[in-house]
Image: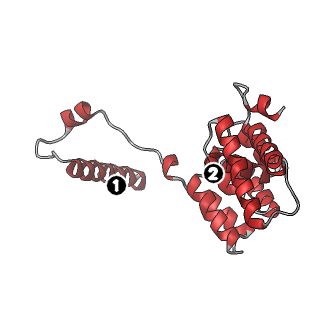
Amino acid sequence: MVDSNIQRTKILPSEKAFAYKMKLEAEKHQGKRTDLTSSQLATKSKRATDVIEESTGESRDTIYRYIRLTELMPEILQMVDDEEIAFTPAVEMSYLTNGEQYILLDNMQMYDATPSLAQAIHMKKLSQEGKLTADKIDEIMGEEKPNQIPKVKFNEDRLRSVLPSHVNTQEQIEDFVITCIQEHNQREKSKMLSR
């Protein structure tokens, strides 16, 4: 049953996570003897992941990352299934305690944002150190992400058509545009004060 679920063309990350977890447990316990030493059990566990690796085409690391998703609270796992949270940050978030995950969920809803990979790694590290508080989660989630900073783009030909000929380099263009904006703002401010 697990094998047929894993082979479906469209499978949700949560379905794959629980299927891999069930398959790993089944492989670990298949033919298990109680008189084996712990080192032999470790070898048996390794073979279990090899079996899953061969049958799915996924690497051992990927299989374990999917299994980590089973540690997420249901609401966050649903966000992964709905593609609101990327896979890799979700794996990092799975290391947070249930309480920390609930606080994070509240913050995600409040900010209408999900953690970047860097933010998720930062929270995981603080959690492991016992330093992840509600305030720290709020602070991390309130940070502006580099990919959220709007970039200003200009049509180069149009811009060069109005620039003085001595303004050539990217730095000179940037300086010139900033100076023009500052002068414009100063004129506007003077107009407001003279009224």
Q: Position of residue 103 (x, y in %)?
A: 78, 60
Helix, strand or loop at disc 2?
helix
Of residues 107 and 123, the one drawn nearer to the viewer in this rendering: 123
User: Could you tell me if residue 49 is visible in this image?
Assistant: yes
Furthest-left residue in this view: 166
- The residue type indicated by label 2 comes to Pro
**Residue found 74% across the figure and 34% down from its top:** 12
Task: Work out whether mark 1 precedes mark 2 in sequence or the reverse, and give the earlier one.
Answer: 2
Quarter of the figure with the N terminus: top right
- In the visual, does 179 lie left or right of 48? left
Circle 2 crowding by C-alpha within 10 Å: few under 14, some 14–19, many from 20 = some
What amino acid type is highlighted by mark number 1? Gln
Q: Residue furthest top?
A: 9
On the image, the x and y values in percent for residue 116 come to 59, 52
- Find residue 89 and name its label: 2
* Label 1 – label 2 distance at C-alpha: 45 Å
Q: Quick check: can you spot residue 139? A: no
Q: Pinpoint residue 133: horizontal percent, then vertical percent.
A: 73, 70
Q: Residue 77 carries which label?
A: none
Residue 155, given in percent of the width and then of the height, sits at: 30, 32
User: In the rendered image, which residue does mark 1 sit on?
Assistant: 186
Helix, strand or loop at label 1? It is: helix
Residue 6, above or below 113: above
**Image quadrant in which you'd find residue 39:** bottom right
Q: Nearer the viewer, residue 26 or 176?
A: 26
Residue at (78% x, 37% y) in the render = 15
* For residue 33, side relative to residue 4 (left or right): right
Is disc 1 surrounded by few (<14), some (14 to 19) or many (20+) residues within 10 Å?
Answer: few
Name of the residue lying farthest toward the right? 34
